[in-house]
Image (cartoon, rainbow, N blue to C red):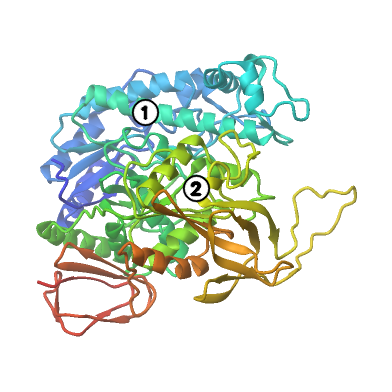
Amino acid sequence: MFKPSLLYTGTNYHPHDWSEEEWIRDLDRMQQAGFTFIRLGHLCWDSFEPREGVFTFDWMDRVFSLCAERGIGVFLDIPTRPAPTWLHLKYPSIDIVTKEGIRCNANTRYMEDVGDPFFQKYAYRLASTLSSRYKDHPALLGFGLCNELGSGYHSYSETARVRFTKWLEKKYGSIDALNEAWAAKRWSRKEAAFSAICFPENALGKGAPERYLDMKRFFSDEILAYQKGLAETIKNMAPQALTSCNHWAENPGVGYDYPKTYRYVMDYPGQGFYPGTNPELEEGFLGACFCSDYRCGELKKPIWDLEFQTGGFGDYSCPPGAMRMYTYLSYIYRAQVVCAWTYRTMLGGEEQYVFGLVDHDGSVTFKWEEFARISREAQVLNQLQLFPRIPSPRIAIAYSYESLLVSDYGKDYYSTPYTRQIMETYKTLFHMNLDCNIVDLRQVDTSYDVVLIPGHCVMDPASKKTVDRLLKEHTTVIMTAFSAKVDEHNQAFSTPLPGLLSEEFGIRVKGFDRSRTHNPSVNAGGLEKEAIDVARRDVTLHLEDKETGIPVNYHEFLEPVTARVLGYYEDTPWERPCAVSCTEYRGGKAIYLGVPASEDVLKVLLPDLLAEKGIFPRYPEEAGIVLRDLGEEHRIYVNTNPHAVTLHLEKEGHSVFSQETYCGTLKLEGYGVEILSFQ
């Protein structure tokens, strides 16, 4: 049933909340609106298995049949989270134990330890049962690998601790190797045996950075292993069925190292596309687009937006037109599937006031009409086969889950958050209307003209090898402050910085300074001192003769060895110290920026470097316009502004929606979208 050349629009639906009469009414309405699929099954394990080993499928069988009668596909989520109450009662080891040692009742969703073998036994059984039952149904579009893996809670239970010690033993082999990697001689913390090791976090605080990083790696690997096991279970029973997952690898509380396995775990990357109900806040849709690129990585595949913003917690809707604008923004950023969250607003439960396309009483809203328009337009686009859009970017941004962990742990030093450096870099390319891939330096499969490495504080041998290969391929590699400070064990380098890459970049980073006072979390000196915030000096960054006076706070002192100076600091106690360096290395160009990544700096530094590679940014007449070519004859324009914008056209264009002809100018209303044909 699935055709990879088509767009799919639909909605999340929860039939276990409604009567069969309401199913028929709702599905008829979806069919009339042109919906091509619905997502079912998530978050309702005990609706399928109300008691251990007792399964009830009649209700879902009936929904599948109703969908098939209407030509509506079904994406069936395998709802292994939250676990049912009866499973918690039978196996208390799956309960969450906090770092304070308190066992918590599962009073909300995602309060189960996904690494627990008893949980996995029953979860895989459910996955096997559901996938076996529906694998050959004509309405099936695919299976979901659970819902929002990566969110929830870490469990610090005794059973989890034992698994952690076994994970460490497998990784290090000997206790001596572990003690060396953990710098355990510091503060008298040598371990005598793997079996005695505790979690390096408790009610009083976190342990040393080396062991804390390993703990987070352990939690991440357990989620990855569970997701992989879920995928294998489904494929064993339904080898032809497609899989995806709206996981939450970026969740700030839990999360996981998604790039380690994304190439082979699921057939199509997935996500929840949540740019926020306030499109005036650009960071919202920037973050949603970034996640699309991040989850696609280097795959030549589109992404499935298995949840899509309709309302919010206590927020009724986006402004009229914004949901359609978000949809086309998602199409530009690789979306193939757009699935509204949710169809009908739930009457009860924790998401009682997350407002969907339809109100509590079942009545339609302007959101419904807007999404129906989106669905009708998708049918037009399917005839033209302009989407899904699979770009082949010549630019990449390196993202590191481990650098995120390390910089978050060491906030006293890494004063610019890692995610801010990443998003400042991404925002620069977004405003230039340039595509990029988000890559993992530990494994890069593609060649690029330009690779940006913002704040990549962990530098391991695999990442160094990648940088060396890129430079040999004549890539321009740009690295920013806070990069290559620690090795794979989170220990500082004893060699010149940037660690492992000082030769490639032709510099030595000789310390740093801050233009404002620094207030550490540890109030050293014996007496409590009040935090102050004073501008010590107004340091500015100069980039050759192009732009002057860019203010900076944290700034590293660069000592050129083989590199030449591209920029310098002014208003420091030293005479124009090097701020930006460049060296030719093995055919490539290695540039080090001694300040954290910011759009103010990058929008000045990048254009000439991109032009050398034949890459040219597009800046429309007004900010907030996103545009891309769709092949040689079509171009899409998306206005993210609430006000109308008039754009200059170089040649006559014809709207694929209205067939209207535009000569000279194109006016886009607030949140307006247009696709023009220039045949």
Q: Tell me, yes or no, if residue 355 can be seen here.
A: no
Name the element at disc 2. helix
Numbered circles on residues, count = 2
What amino acid type is highlighted by mark number 1? Lys
Name the element at disc 1. helix
The location of residue 71, given as percent across then percent down, is 12, 45
Q: Which mark is residue 144?
A: none
Q: Tell me, yes or no, if residue 650 can be seen here.
A: yes
Residue placed most toward the observer, 308 or 293:
293
The residue lying at 56 percent from left, 76 percent from top is 548
The residue lying at 17 percent from left, 46 percent from top is 4
Within 10 Å of disc 2 (Cα), the crowding (few <14, some 14-19, many 20+) is many
Residue 532 occupies quadrant: bottom right
Within 10 Å of disc 1 (Cα), the crowding (few <14, some 14-19, many 20+) is some
What amino acid type is highlighted by mark number 2? Glu
Q: Name the residue carrying label 1.
A: 228
The residue lying at 74 percent from left, 68 percent from top is 573
Residue placed most toward the observer, 349 or 203:
203
Circle nearer the N terminus (1, 2)? 1
Is residue 358 placed above or below 642 in the rendered structure? above
Is residue 676 placed above or below 299 in the rendered structure? below
CA distance for labels 1 and 2:
37 Å
Is residue 608 placed above or below 110 in the rendered structure? below
Q: Quarter holding the C terminus?
A: bottom left
Q: Name the residue carrying label 2.
A: 504
Is residue 474 placed above or below 654 in the rendered structure? above
The location of residue 542, given as percent across then percent down, is 57, 71
Q: Residue furthest right?
A: 527
Residue placed most toward the observer, 584 or 419:
584
Nearer the observer, disc 1 or disc 2? 2
Q: Residue furthest front?
A: 562
